[in-house]
Amino acid sequence: MTARRQGESPQHILLLGASGVSGLAFVTEHLSIPATDPAKPFLTLYIRASSRSKFTSALPSATTTDIQASKIRIIEGELTDESAVRTAFSANGVFPKVTAVISVLGAYMSLYHFLTRTKPTPIADALKSIVVPTMRAMGVKRILVLSTPSFQVPGENKQMSWGWYLNGMLPVVVLPQGNAEMKGIAHAVMDNSLAKLEQREGLEATVFRVPLLTEGSRELEVRAFVLGGTGNTENKTLSRRSMVRWLLKELDEKEWIGKSPMLCNLVAQ
Ligand SMILES: NC(=O)c1ccc[n+]([C@@H]2O[C@H](COP(=O)([O-])OP(=O)(O)OC[C@H]3O[C@@H](n4cnc5c(N)ncnc54)[C@H](OP(=O)(O)O)[C@@H]3O)[C@@H](O)[C@H]2O)c1
């Protein structure tokens, strides 16, 4: 990650979806930043209590000394638990207030929803009704959320290749509920229903769209682009750890605020 400007305090990231494969890749990347690096961000993992066991091997023990050194804390709660969400945003003796939210939340595949064609969106609903209002109340503006190519930037569909068009249509047909959830997550922070893309009031939002996620190398170069625009790749894969590195860079550089880049590696791995 790049150094923060002199005099700026470190970021404090609230990670949603920390217990998923991308979330665990985020934690691994964070643990690899030396504790002596003054730019190492504080990290709060907001997880469901039932997923706590996924962290036993990834994290140091929960002693105060370890938490101070690793700059990681875990807060348990459902996304609908307003009080626990507020605690996750709050400062304590060691952690400053949250400065940015990153969501790698996403729907699981569901045979039931596929067969019944039902499309509940519990994650998107909770983001809209609990998380974003809590951000506003706590004065936190920056949020980056993971979504899919079916969330389109206005005008994009006229320029993109057939390959990307089909890539965006596949989840609509095969995973209708998952697709509705991922689009709903994007809509919680950004509106693309008009001729332009607009952030929700009071937010500095980035909707980063991902193709097939892989376990490839963290060193793979990440290209961020608008479909059909400059830098468009035809490779449709992204390694999770390279995505995490891009997210940490974007937090510092703020290049894609109010935008919705597609992220891809230049080559598949
Ligand atoms: N895999 C791909 O190639 C691909 C491609 C495009 C998009 N996506 C989307 O990107 C997301 C991230 O991918 P991934 O494979 O790294 O993640 P993943 O392992 O599927 O993790 C999903 C995360 O979302 C959380 N979650 C799911 N439903 C929730 C709910 N109702 N309330 C609170 N948390 C909930 C899970 O928490 P728990 O651990 O508590 O269940 C977990 O932390 C996927 O979920 C998928 O929708 C994936």
Image (cartoon, rainbow, N blue to C red):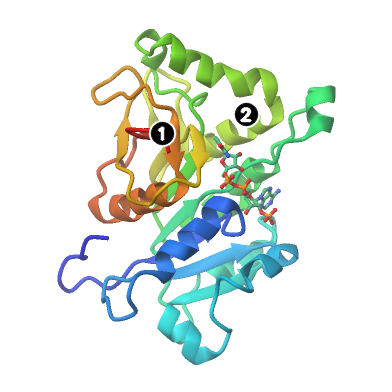
Q: Which residue is mark 1?
A: 268
Q: Nearer the viewer, residue 134 or 104?
A: 104
Residue extending furthest toward the left: 6
Q: Is residue 22 left or right of residue 119?
A: left
The N terminus, quarter of image: bottom left
Eyeballing the image, is 40 above or below 224? below
Mark 2 element type: helix
Q: Which residue is mark 2?
A: 179
Q: Residue at x 54, y 59 (%)?
A: 24
Amino acid at circle 1: Ala
Is tag 2's residue or tag 1's residue first in the polypeptide sequence?
Answer: 2
- Measured in 3D between alpha carbons, the distance from the residue under mark 2 to the one under mark 1, in whole angstroms, is 23 Å
Mark 1 element type: loop
- In this orientation, does residue 233 appear? yes
Give the number of callouts.
Answer: 2
Image coords of residue 218 (percent x, y) = 38, 52
Eyeballing the image, is 74 above or below 156? below
